[in-house]
Structures are given as structure tokens and as C-alpha cells.
């Protein structure tokens, strides 16, 4: 199922106060690899996770990492960025 998201822009919600956006490049049993990624610490702004993601959908991913490995055990959810529904 997750393989359907390969080479697409995704939103990854983590257990912590981070949300990541980028292009899903690779998957293995321990990691997801994102390219041209934005790893955003929600404690750095007053916006909610949902508003930050909706803004990124509207204005584009604010890339701050060329390559990012995420530990799969820390992932709560993953979705295609294009599947984000604006409130």
C-alpha cells in the first residue's frame, strides 16, 4: 500500500511535534526516505499542523532538507499532499 506513494509528494505526521513534507523516494523496513523535504517543528510557530500542511499545499513545500530519513516507528500517518483536504 505505501508503495503507491513512491515518487509522490507526501505529508508524514510523526508522534512528536514534527510534520514532514517531501517526495517519497524509498521505503525499507526501518526508514522512509524523503527528497526535497521540509521537516517542520510545530513548536516554532503558532500554526496548527493542519494549517501548516494546507499552507504548504497552497504555496509549495518549503524545502530545508535535500534528503531526509524518517524512522518508521515514529510515523503516525502518511498521505499524498494532493489528498490534503482544506477546511
Image (tube, rainbow, N blue to C red):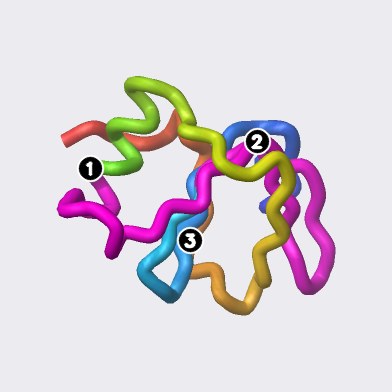
Q: Which of the two discs, 2 and 3, sits closer to the camera?
A: 2
Q: Position of residue 20 (x, y in %)?
A: 50, 51
Q: Residues within 10 Å of mark 1 (few under 14, many from 20)?
A: few
Query: Which residue is rendered at x = 67% and y = 71% of the image?
Result: 71
- Tell me the distance, in whole angstroms, between the alpha carbons under discs 2 and 3: 19 Å
Which corner quadrant of the image does residue 60 belong to?
Answer: top left
Q: Position of residue 16 (x, y in %)?
A: 41, 74
Question: Which mark is on residue 34?
Answer: none
Which corner quadrant of the image does residue 86 belong to?
Answer: top left
Q: Position of residue 44 (x, y in %)?
A: 29, 58
36 sits to left or right of 19 = right
Task: State whether the magenta stretch is mostly helix, strand or loop.
Answer: strand
- Tell me the distance, in whole angstroms, between the alpha carbons under discs 1 and 2: 20 Å
Query: Which residue is rendered at x = 16% and y = 36% of the image?
Result: 87
67 sits to left or right of 79 = right
Q: Is residue 47 above or below residue 86?
A: below
Disc 2 secondary structure class: strand
Query: Which residue is rendered at x = 34% and y = 41% of the image?
Result: 53
Magenta part of the chain = 21-50
Question: Which residue was labeled with disc 2?
Answer: 36
Question: Which residue was labeled with disc 3?
Answer: 77
Question: Which residue was labeled with disc 1?
Answer: 51
Disc 1 secondary structure class: helix
Q: Is residue 40 above or below residue 56?
A: below
Residue 38 is a magenta residue:
yes
Examine the rendering and report whether any part of residue 4 can be seen: no
Query: Which residue is rendered at x = 44% and y = 75% of the image?
Result: 15
Amino acid at each position: 500500500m505505501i508503495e503507491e506513494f513512491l515518487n509522490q509528494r507526501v505529508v508524514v505526521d510523526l508522534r512528536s511535534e514534527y510534520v514532514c513534507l517531501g517526495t517519497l523516494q524509498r521505503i525499507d523496513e526501518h526508514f522512509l526516505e524523503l527528497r526535497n523535504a521540509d521537516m517542520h517543528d510545530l513548536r516554532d510557530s503558532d500554526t496548527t499542523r493542519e494549517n501548516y500542511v494546507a499552507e504548504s499545499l497552497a504555496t509549495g513545500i518549503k524545502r530545508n532538507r535535500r534528503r531526509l530519513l524518517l524512522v518508521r516507528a515514529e510515523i503516525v500517518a502518511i498521505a499524498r499532499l494532493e489528498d490534503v483536504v482544506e477546511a
